């Protein structure tokens, strides 16, 4: 069996031309590139077009509720830190419904990679504004346009001192592959916000729109400089930077929990005898 | 021999320290103890009390009448002096509360003065007070000094010694000055009893069931479960994670469970309300989980530190869509240990959510019991961990089996991926939309599993005469008070009671005895700590039975023994009419 | 005269455009129409269909048999050709689907070719197809061209004209080439009928009730309500706010309601699951709110675009603690208008939450009806806005009145502050902990209000012969199919049905007729679109009645007329045994 | 009646010495200083020690659920934008349970003032770690110490371009009064994070601890400079700045909703006739 075939899943139900396809392919490249096995990996997703992704590859999968990927992923990682845990989310999923979990996952810093398929729209529910939708964009639920100012996930993550913050683009698959690899290899919570054209509902942020704006951060950018990272994260509009915006060293959640030792929790021994004997403390 | 001791004062005065020490001294001395707590939702001030009933026979509820009132402020005397029995005594420090009750039934003990003089610091006042109570009851001080040693050993010898000095001084003072003291606790032959409260019992039940992951957001009165497990975390290898909110708490626990460890979450009603979507997720993904819900009066924030049995129907029907669940409502800490253990076992065996439903009254009440039946604690591992399962076709997370239960593999322990989905899915776990698979999966989750689950549950517990005339029926935390009530009722009433602790799914085939007794009883009284009679309604829906009466309490306080006895007598006086 | 037309193909092909246009042409022509939609949870591809039943008599359900199948791809033919009746016809474009069915019952119409030639662009294919169907049925094209004008006028004259050309060409083509066509719709004398679906009806019901604030998070199949209200926002002064999550949605609506405007939220089961704590908050703070819950099959994400009646018991018991609620489950868009209006009225009158429970089937089904009884629409303002209320003692938000209903003041409109609290509170709204106030408040919220609320509700609707032999009982969206079923059953069966749309609290005193009919009927059949028989269980708990049979469907699809008739006949064949 | 008396409420149930007392007094100063009336004002609070504050003053009050102050406050403001709406929250309340609402309230920018009583602890539930608890602080539920890195609410707010971001301190009441006044007068969403000693459970961040560290931002700080604001917001430890960290101009939510005109929604006319007539659109 050719390793890439190992990751062949169900056939996708996305629209033809959807920006999710290159992300799916990139992910398969990453898995083979890092020599992962479907049973070493857990993909955790929510509900949305992105949430379907795990079904289209092959790995341990928990496709849970809309917005709740990160708590599930954290529970999995704590129970078995030997697994490579990847959370796959949509922009509505992760920055809207699940916003609180993002903040606190960043604070906890588990060694999880979060891929946000940021199409700046609610795809699966047919085109309402998401938290990243450009201000003013009208939709059927907001006929006068989206009023809230769009959320800047990278700035948010930098402000919370997230241990790895990057932006990828579905239109640059090779680059995306490298980015996701780095995110997975980085020890700690890694956010990769992926610009993902939605060819059906987002008629503003198209392949062309992104293509004209994205550029790759070069050597001159020092991702360890937090202030600089914050400045870069604010860039949006004429120029949109791709690459690792911010990165820092730090201990992960798992490393800080003394209960987790060399053996993952799920394999660590438990003495029922000793547990039962705790009753005597009540005497 | 039976006494009731009430310690009353404001939050922050150390009422709990005194109360739990006295309770512990009694239980170590082999006496039976029942304690309950009444406290406000504030950190300092207000008015709280802690009540201890001690006896040489088992006790399982509180009385109205107080034998010894330890009044830590004037308000305590104003509020509670009426509850003190004619032979009872109020002890207080007239210097501290700045009022002298120089009259029979009142004993001034200069707690602060003794503490400063003997212990060297007035912070030992509570130790003095505890010593004084023990002196009044003529209980050997040894046990208390042992407890002080355990509690303060971390703070060094001096603190231990000062405490012991203070305790002894209080003890002596009481013995010398208590002329009216007619109390006496005969030395007890029993060996030390176990004493624990409902929250500790659930925590301990989880511990012995191999719970390795507990995620929760703090919420009164459930936080004690988390505190207990956190205190055992390092020793027994448990991850206790404080979540950012209850939604996260349940989803984390589901993640951990999916990854192969036994997982639990807990909260009170308001926090559980936020877990409802996650509950439904457990139902769809067939992920085992145990959920402790420790009730307090609602709706909304309600009365955060008080008690009610107001969430039963909510839990029985919580979650969109249809899926099976188990609900246990223990009646005592002892039951809580076994039922929490059973909840873990059945949650994993059938891959469904299981509730342990408690309330503030049970959570904060301490009971004594002799020992634990270790053999009754189950510890089966239902997970599939054979590394032999390889290849894409061998393992399907949701395969349809005759029992409806699919093999539960640990991701990473087999070569085939383990897949599940909150969408309706096929046997492998992939999302589907067709009608045939949908029907098959609904039937797998519901109809195949339910009959077997039903058989696992036990019928209600009965205590009382054969063919009782008067039958009390209750569930959850009313167990103890029903038990004591039956004994207090005049014998000619022929009163008995059924207590349901295994509530859902009702083991209908095992309810013959219950139904027969129920039909034959002249007065059937549903006893509930809520306003709408939720359990009564549940039995009507499940069994089509009608009670002749009910007694309901919804003031945020538990049933007190004397009050329940009185309420029943009133019912009977009214001629059994309703 | 009655025909069924099914348009089938993949998502994104414009099935809805064709379907709703045809439905609208019929209703404008004065025909009765019933449509329903079957679609997958994806944006492109997959397989969807839209079914239209048209008749000169009222129709309220779908049939199995199809008279005209508009097949937009090969799969459509493969899946549906078996449903086409012997006199029916499949129309398709052999060039587009690249397959020729040159056989009786199939009519090739070159949609794309005609569209390109006549309209100038193949995007007009759907207009051609619609025209063709109208041609086959010999319906005057005027009405359709009128609709095209309305729909496309914003895009300019050319687009309108091209569409009309395409429609006409399709029409002519069908008339010329349809040799087998035996369809004919006699010109109808009726004036145009109203046609709307369940979501539009709830939205419209809210609009006419003076709903000024709707906050929600998108969720299929409830989003249509939000879309409807958003489309009317500017004209009628409604704020429609897309919330960050459902928790925010309900809390925002409660804030708006507290500030004095009529407020509503809506979702499907999973989203509502997140609102449960907020529901309890509405209960405690006595803040009026209307909640639309449009069910889809659960648990969890379930089948997002399909239908089920699986959340009834969940909604009836949702929320920790005890508080009254109203639950309406309309059976048709017409009922949905009136019941949404009543929900607003009663929510404000009694200051409680009121549910409008719908489902995907009702949400997406269009019904026709003649007109609205404008006088039946209630519009009372129960708010207290007198600026005369000044001074600290005059106004108490939660004052205890004989009816339990306190004056509802708009903050800022009186000089006294309006205060409420999620904690248990006193009459002013300040938090309390004492037992007396607690009891008084529980009794105010529950026991004082409930009897009056109960009296507000109406008994179920009955249709059928006096003293029926066979009695169907259902609720919510099964209304239409039960109605049609009764008419299709052999007369000797003497079948009738009761439909409950006003479900909670059951108006027990008005159920005499129902209970009597029920007791006398030989076969009583509970019809529900769920697996566990939730309504059957509810009636058992409330009324103690037992059905002889039930028919349940839980494949995510609605009851189809012929299937329900068949299921009943089967039940009878089995000799009425169960 | 003396105007300050107008704001006398129930008697507080806080611990003696609690940092909430000076905040309460400051608030009464603000109300009288701005010449507000109890009926012009709405205080919205959640559950926690801070949540009790509205009962201890006198104003329209919605004391709702733990964590849900901001959605309620937003609903109130939209329904009646003539009211002065103040949301009072705890650090657990607003940064923990209610984190998602904070993010999105900032994005919406309603003209609401949010006062967070940041005692770096869960007070009412007796001393568990809150999102702002210093890393490593042990508690009964986290005996090995709080592992997550503390949330920096000011940095978070600046990253989201919050229209007014300030820090006050309960120990400097006069300064706090001025800050809150500015926040209320600022048109748009204003976050005032108030350092509030919890004398009972927080034995680390005491009056003394804060007293030794806080300093007031001077003229040299330009609150309109976002990068500079971000840099300042990161200051924590030896030196903790007080004052307005960031401020920007912008249109409020209410101003952008065309349905809201001169008259607030609650008073704006509604024609039932016209509404009923909409049925004809279905014909
Ligand atoms: C609790 C809950 N609320 C709402 C929904 C409906 N829903 C499903 S996906 C989705 C949003 C999709 O947007 P996004 O997360 O950006 O994913 P995309 O489809 O764009 O990839 C919504 C609102 C849901 N499934 N659950
Ligand atoms: C949904 C929900 N979860 C948990 C609680 C319990 N609870 C009440 S206040 C509180 C935290 C208090 O901390 P904070 O918000 O910082 O306020 P403080 O008391 O410190 O002012 C918690 C966890 C609750 N009331 N509701
Ligand atoms: S709707 Fe948009 S995001 Fe969804 S599959 Fe289609 S193109 Fe992709
Ligand atoms: S516990 Fe802390 S925050 Fe709460 S009242 Fe006491 S000192 Fe204040
Ligand atoms: Mg999206
Ligand atoms: Mg706090």
Image (cartoon, coloured by chain):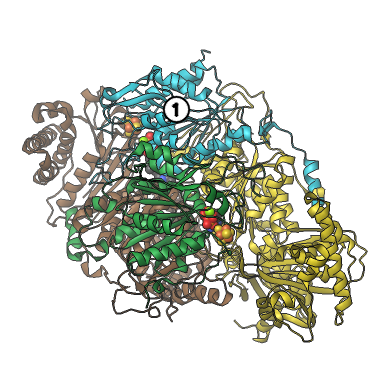
Chain colours: A cyan, B yellow, C brown, D green
Which residue, as the protein is rendered here, is positioned at the far top? A2
User: Residue A118 at what x, y percent from top left?
Assistant: 37, 32
Name above or below for residue C119 compared with residue B115: above
What chain does badge 1 belong to? Answer: A
- Mark 1 closeness class: few <14, some 14–19, many ≥20 residues within 10 Å: few
Task: State which image quarter holds ligand 3.
Answer: top left
Task: Give how far across and how far down residue A30 sits, in percent.
Answer: 48, 19
Work out whether residue C68 can be spotted. Answer: no
Position above or below: B82 against C486: below
User: Residue at coordinates 85% horizontally, 61% vertically from top-left?
Assistant: B164
Residue D234: x percent and y percent? Answer: 46, 39
Quadrant of the rendered structure where residue D277 is? bottom left
Left/right of residue B136 with respect to residue B390 in the rendered view: right
- The answer to whether B283 appears left or right of B89 in the picture is left
Work out which residue is located at the far front of the displayed protein and give it: D219
* Front position in the image: A224 or A57: A224
Q: Residue at x 73, y 50 (%)?
A: B204
Q: How many marks?
A: 1
Residue B104 visible here = yes
Residue C295 image position (x, y, % from top left): 41, 51
Drawn side of residue C85 relative to residue C27, left or right:
right
Quadrant in the picture for the C terminus of chain A: bottom right
Residue B21 in the image: above or below residue C232: below
Can you tell me whether the CB of the residue at mark 1 lies under 8 Å from the nearest atom of ligand 5? no
Secondary structure type for disc 1: loop
Q: In this view of the protein, which residue sits in the foreground, C440 or B79?
A: B79
Q: Look at mark 1 in the image and give the residue it sits on.
A: A225
Q: Quadrant of residue B467?
A: bottom right
- Residue nearest the viewer, comparing A128 with D193: D193
């Amino acid at each position: 069996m050719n390793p890439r075939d190992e990751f062949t899943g169900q056939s996708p139900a996305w629209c033809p031309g959807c920006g999710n396809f290159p992300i799916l392919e990139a992910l398969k490249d990453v898995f083979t590139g890092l020599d992962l096995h479907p049973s070493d990996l857990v993909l955790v997703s929510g509900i949305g077009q992105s949430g379907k992704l795990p079904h289209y590859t092959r790995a341990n999968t928990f496709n849970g509720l809309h917005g709740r990927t990160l708590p599930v992923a954290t529970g999995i990682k704590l129970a078995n830190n030997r697994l490579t845990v990847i959370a796959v989310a949509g922009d509505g999923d992760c920055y809207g419904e699940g916003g609180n979990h993002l903040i606190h996952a960043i604070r906890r810093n588990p060694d999880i990679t979060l891929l946000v398929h940021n199409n700046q729209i609610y795809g699966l529910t047919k085109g309402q504004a998401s938290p990243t939708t450009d201000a003013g964009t009208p939709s059927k639920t907001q006929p006068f346009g989206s009023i809230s100012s769009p959320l800047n996930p990278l700035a948010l993550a930098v402000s919370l001192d997230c241990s790895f913050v990057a932006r990828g683009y579905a239109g640059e698959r090779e680059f995306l592959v490298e980015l996701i690899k780095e995110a997975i290899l980085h020890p700690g919570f890694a956010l990769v916000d992926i610009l993902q054209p939605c060819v059906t509902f987002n008629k503003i942020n198209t392949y062309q729109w992104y293509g004209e704006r994205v550029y790759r951060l070069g050597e001159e950018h020092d991702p360890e400089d937090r202030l600089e990272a914050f400045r870069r994260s604010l860039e949006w509009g004429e120029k949109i930077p791709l690459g690792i915006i911010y990165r820092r060293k730090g201990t992960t959640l798992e490393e800080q929990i003394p209960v987790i030792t060399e053996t993952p929790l799920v394999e660590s021994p438990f003495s029922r005898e000793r547990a039962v004997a705790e009753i005597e403390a009540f005497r | 021999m039976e006494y009731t001791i009430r310690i009353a004062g404001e939050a922050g005065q150390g009422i709990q320290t005194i109360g739990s020490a006295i309770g512990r001294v009694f239980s170590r001395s082999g006496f039976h103890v029942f304690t309950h707590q009444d406290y406000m939702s504030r950190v300092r001030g207000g008015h709280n009390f802690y009540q201890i009933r001690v006896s040489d026979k088992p006790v399982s509820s509180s009385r109205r009448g107080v034998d010894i009132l330890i009044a830590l402020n004037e308000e305590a005397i104003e509020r509670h002096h009426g509850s003190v029995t004619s032979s009872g005594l109020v002890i207080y420090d007239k210097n501290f509360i700045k009022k002298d009750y120089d009259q029979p039934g009142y004993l001034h003990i200069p707690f602060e003065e003794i503490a400063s003089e003997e212990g060297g610091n007035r912070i030992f006042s509570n130790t003095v007070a505890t010593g004084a109570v023990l002196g009044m009851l003529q209980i050997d001080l040894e046990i208390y000094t042992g407890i002080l040693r355990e509690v303060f050993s971390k703070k060094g010898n001096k603190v231990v010694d000062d405490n012991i000095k203070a305790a002894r001084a209080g003890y002596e003072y009481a013995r010398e000055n208590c002329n009216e003291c007619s109390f006496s606790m005969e030395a007890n032959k029993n060996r030390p009893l176990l004493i624990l409260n409902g929250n500790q019992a659930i925590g301990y039940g989880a511990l012995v069931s191999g719970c390795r992951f507990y995620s929760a957001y703090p919420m009164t009165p459930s936080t004690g479960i988390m505190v207990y497990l956190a205190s055992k975390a390092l020793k027994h290898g448990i991850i206790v994670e404080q979540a950012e909110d209850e939604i996260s708490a349940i989803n984390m626990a589901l993640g951990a469970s999916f990854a192969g460890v036994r997982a639990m979450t807990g909260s009170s009603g308001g926090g559980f309300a936020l877990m409802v979507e996650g509950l439904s997720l457990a139902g769809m993904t067939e992920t085992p989980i145990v959920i402790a819900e420790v009730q307090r009066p609602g709706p909304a924030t309600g009365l955060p530190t008080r008690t009610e049995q107001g969430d039963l129907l909510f839990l029985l029907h919580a979650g969109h869509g249809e899926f099976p669940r188990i609900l246990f409502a223990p009646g005592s800490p002892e039951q809580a240990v076994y039922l929490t253990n059973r909840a873990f076992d059945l949650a994993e065996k059938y891959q469904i959510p299981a509730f342990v439903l408690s309330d503030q009254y049970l959570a904060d009440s301490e009971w004594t019991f002799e020992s634990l039946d270790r053999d009754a604690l189950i510890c089966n591992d239902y997970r599939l961990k054979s590394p032999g399962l390889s290849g894409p076709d061998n393992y399907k997370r949701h395969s349809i089996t005759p029992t409806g239960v699919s093999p539960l593999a640990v991701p990473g322990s087999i070569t085939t991926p383990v897949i599940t989905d909150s969408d309706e899915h096929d046997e492998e776990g992939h999302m589907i939309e067709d009608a045939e698979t949908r029907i098959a999966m609904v039937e797998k989750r519901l109809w195949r599993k339910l009959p077997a689950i039903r058989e696992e549950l036990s019928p209600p517990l009965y205590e009382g005469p054969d063919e009782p005339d008067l039958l009390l029926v209750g569930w959850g935390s009313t167990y103890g008070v029903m038990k004591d009530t039956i004994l207090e009722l005049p014998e000619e009433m022929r009163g008995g009671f059924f207590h349901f602790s295994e509530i859902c799914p009702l083991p209908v085939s095992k309810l013959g005895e219950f139904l027969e007794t129920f039909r034959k009883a002249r007065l059937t009284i549903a006893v509930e700590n809520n306003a709408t009679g939720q359990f009564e309604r549940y039995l009507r829906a499940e069994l089509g039975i009608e009670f002749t009466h009910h007694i309901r309490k919804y003031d945020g306080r538990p049933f007190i023994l004397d009050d329940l006895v009185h309420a029943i007598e009133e019912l009977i006086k009214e001629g059994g009419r309703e």
